[in-house]
Image (cartoon, rainbow, N blue to C red):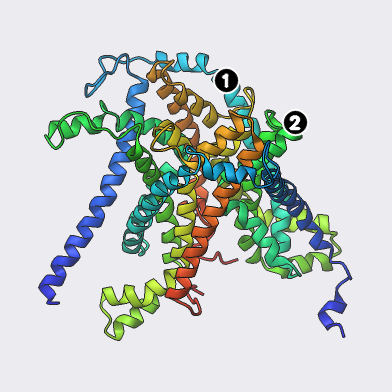
Amino acid sequence: MSSGLRAWFDRTWRGLLLGVMTLFVVNVGLMIAAVATSSFARRWLGTWLPEGWTTNWYTAAWKEFQLGSVLWVTVEVVLAVVLLALIIGVPAAYTLARRNFLGKRALMLLFLLPLMVPPITYGIPLATVLYKAQLAGTIYGVILANLIPAAPFVILVMTPFIEQIDPNLESAARVFGASTAKMFWHVLVPLLAPGILAASLLVLVRTIALFELTFLTAGPDSQTLVVALYYAVFAAGVRAPQSVDAMAMIYMVVTLVWLLIALRFVNPTQLVSRVKEQPLTA
Amino acid sequence: MKSADALARPALDRTLLLVVPAAAFMLALFVYPFLYGLELSFEPKEGGALGNYRHFFTTDNLWPTIWTTLRLAIPATLINVGLALPIAYKMRVKTRYQRWVTTLLVVPITLGTVLIAEGALTYFGPKGWLSQTLQLFHIYEGPIRLTHNYWGVLISLVISGFPFAFLLILSYITGIDPVLARAAATLGADPAAQFRHIYLPLLAPGLAMCFCLSFVQAFSVFPSAVLLGSPAGPTRVISIAAYEAAFEQYDYSLASAIAMIMGFVQLVIVAAVLAMRNAFYRGPVVGGKG
């Protein structure tokens, strides 16, 4: 290849990639803007912009979809999931980071599988079991179901984090006579705080957006925001599209606020994988 | 003979107990339901042990759902991974730009498929902005049909799947030491050769993983297939069939059987991809920065 041809090829290739990327981002951005515009529209039928503006759809959506109670359920579910996932996950991550034992690989597989298998595949047998245990349809069932991907996620985020903490610090605490509980509380928890913060924010954002498991296990009064949104879109013919869009905006704002908070502490790639960009040096 | 290390520790390491709650939780709520579902699927309402499976493969609105789902999931995965690889490769160098793009792309993932479906109905609909723009520039006259059909679901799978594939591949690529490529360049490798002989082999495990995860997600598409597709016809995917069996016909046995078939098909594709990657490259993976 001559150098002129290669330069031309390089430029075209770069332009093409930039074009694809721009096309994607612009269209997704406009899609969100369309929902936002519609939620403030008095009437919007086949024109560039609506005929008039109003905020009435928000009050309408709030009343129609009982958003007050839905939001409260969402808060309860998300907080419970984050807390329980930490309580179950952090000690397990500690063991996995510090000890080698028989069956460790099998255990790791057990914690990896729920993140690999999509929720709807295991959600249906899970819902069957929860219905039999009379937990489905209640908020407890929803919390249990949401913990299945959340607890392993905490383990996978925390394990590499604990690995890079110097074990000598723990030994030193032991030498001075600290019990396991004291050592955990006074040495490990402060050192782990950034990791725990990151893990809880990641679980929080993922749980708000997790649709399938809540959908399969929730009853009428244990719906989270995303499931309520699904039902609103599903029955869109019945209600004004603007009111559904107003609800979508409320959901979007709730999610994005937490995403923005999370992104101050975590890398965006951590939301999809546990591969660390750079190992943190202690 | 016990080693010195084993003698120094008590017979039962109490630290190991810390993993018990998590393991018990996963066994009770992940493994047990799965096994229960598997057993339930062999106890149909009527017919022998294989009654549900026979029913699935002989009923006209059930077995074709496998093909319907594959017809959506495979193109969506190929588009997502195919687009994500070159773009992530281009952005492997850490810049301020990279942080911005990753932040932008994480938005569609966190918003989730339900919101994407609602947005797409408004934006890609016959009276949406896209349609109006195309008409304005006379690219396509008449209303476009991108919602309530196959294309709507495919678009939603790309919108939610592409950022996922991109971020995953990016995190694998940035884990590869750039010194390796620089060494190759010193030996006279042009950028194409560097990609072909350095990055691609090191990326193979990550790419295979990314392909599997993207595929499995696309294969279990549910909300957008209902909201944005035509759930009675061309986008009647397998998860809709399973949902209907469980929550509309209350036949949990059949629903479990469909869920098992769904899991099995995913497993087959994942195994095939991993086998392909082994045929493609086998050897030590030394991609870490340390």
Q: What type is the residue that disc 1 sits on?
A: Gly
Look at discs 2 and 1 and give the one toward the viewer: 2
Sequence order check: which comes first, mark 2 or mark 1? 1
Q: Which residue is drawn at 64% across and 26% down?
A: A219
Q: Which residue is drawn at 34% across and 53% down?
A: B79
Residue A2 on image: x %, y %: 12, 77
Q: Which residue is drawn at the image coordinates 25% and 30% (left, top)?
A: B129
Between B18 and A175, the one nearer to me in the picture: B18
For the question of whether residue A145 can be seen, the reply is no
Cα separation, mark 2 vs mark 1, equals 26 Å
Q: Which residue bears the numbered disc 2?
A: A134
A200 relative position to B11: left or right: left
Circle 1: element type: helix
For residue A69, above or below residue B231: above
Front residue of this view, candidates B237 and A212: B237
Quarter of the image for the N terminus of chain B: give it: bottom right
Q: List the residue tagged with mark 1.
A: A68
Q: What residue type is labelled 2?
A: Gln
- Report which quarter residue A112 is drawn in: bottom right
Nearer to the camera, A117 or A59: A117
Q: Is mark 2 on a helix, strand or loop?
A: loop
Q: Residue at x 54, y 21 (%)?
A: A67
Query: Is residue A119 in sight in this rendering?
Result: yes
Q: What chain does mark 2 sit on? A: A
Toward which corner of the image does residue B174 lie, by quadrant?
bottom left
Left/right of residue B199 with respect to residue A206 in the rendered view: left
User: Foreground: A260 or B147?
Assistant: B147
Residue A142, located in which quarter of the rendered image?
top right
